Amino acid sequence: MTAPRIRVTALTPRMDLGPREARHLHVLRLRVGDALRVFDGQGAEAEAWIAELDAGRAVLTLGEALGGAAETPFPLTLAAALLKGDKLSDVVRAATELGVARVQLLVTARADARDIGAQKLLRLQRVAEEASKQSRRAVVPEVRAPLSLADFRWEGQLFVAQPGSASRIMALLDWGAPVTVLTGPEGGLTDAEVAELTGRGAHAVTLGPRILRAETAPVALLGAIAAAGGGED
C-alpha cells in the first residue's frame, strides 16, 4: 500500500504538526511508528515516521530523501480569467495535476467577476495543495490574486488561447525559458485584448476546430504540453 503524503513547512529532523495536520493523520488511521511521506511544496520530498500523535499535535521524524515527480524544465504558469461558481476550483485542480508552478488569476473585459475575496483565494490554494498530494507532486502551485490584463507581466513565452488562430502551441513551444499559457472567460477575450497581448510578444494559438468552455480550455492547453513530455527530464 502506498504511504500517505502530507505537506510540511520544511523538511527538518523533527517536524511538529498542529491540530489540523494531527486530525488528518487520525482520519487516515495512522499511529505512532507508521511511515508516511512529507513534502514542502517547493520540490523536496522525504520519508518520515510518526514519533508522537495525539488529538492536538503530532511529531514526525525525518527519513530518507525521495525524488519527487518530474517538473517542467522552466516554470509553467497558467494565467486564467476569473470564472463563476466552482469552475476556478476545477481549473486549479486540473492545472496542478498537469504541472503548473503557479496560477495567475486575471480580470478581463468579459470575466464573470471583477475580484475574489481572501477566503476564496485561500480555498483555491488549498485545492492546489490537495491536488499536489493526490498527483504525487512535491510542488504546490501558488494561486495569485487577480490582476488586470494591463498589469499582467510574464517571463519567456506567452501563449494565448484564441479560436481561429492558425498556430499550434507545440510548433512554437521552447523550453529554453519559462512558459505561460493564458485562457479567457466565457465569451472569450476581446479582439482588443488579444491584440494588446500579441503586441507585447504573446503568441495566439488554436485549441482545435471547436469552441471550448472556459474551464476546458486551460486543460486542453496544459494537457497538450503534458502529453508532449513537458514534465520529463
Image (tube, rainbow, N blue to C red):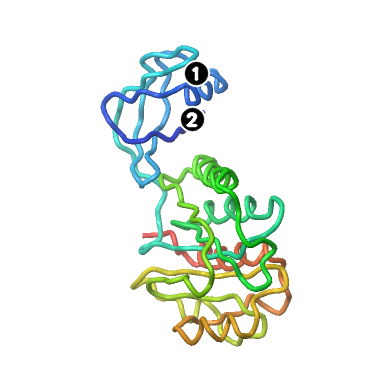
Q: Is residue 230 above or below residue 211?
A: above
Q: Which residue is mark 1?
A: 30
Q: Quadrant of residue 194?
A: bottom right
Left or right for 119, reference 185: left
Q: Which mark is residue 126?
A: none
| Extreme residue toward the left, this view | 13
Residue 15, percent from left and from top: 33, 25
The residue sitting at 50% across, 61% down in the picture is 104
In space, the residues marked 2 and 1 are separated at their CA atoms by 9 Å
How crowded is the residue under tag 2: few (<14 C-alpha within 10 Å), some, or many (20+)?
A: some
The residue sitting at 67% across, 80% down in the picture is 163
Q: Is residue 142 above or below residue 114?
A: above
Going by the numbered disc 2, the residue's amino acid type is: Pro
Q: Quadrant of residue 200?
A: bottom left
Residue 86, percent from left and from top: 69, 50
Q: Secondary structure at mark 2?
A: loop
Using the image as rendered, state which of residue 130 and residue 31 is in the foreground.
Answer: 130
Residue 211, percent from left and from top: 73, 74
Going by the numbered disc 1, the residue's amino acid type is: Leu
Q: Is residue 159 above or below residue 93?
A: below
Using the image as rendered, state which of residue 28 and residue 203 is in the foreground.
Answer: 203
Left or right for 178, reference 193: left
| First-in-chain label (2 vs 1) | 2
Tag 2–tag 1 contact (CB < 8 Å): yes
Residue 223, percent from left and from top: 57, 63
Using the image as rendered, state which of residue 44 and residue 54 is in the foreground.
Answer: 54
Q: Give the position of the C terminus as an image quadrant.
A: bottom left
Q: Which mark is residue 4?
A: 2
Left or right for 61, reference 139: left
Q: Is residue 153 above or below residue 167?
A: above
Q: Secondary structure at mark 1?
A: loop
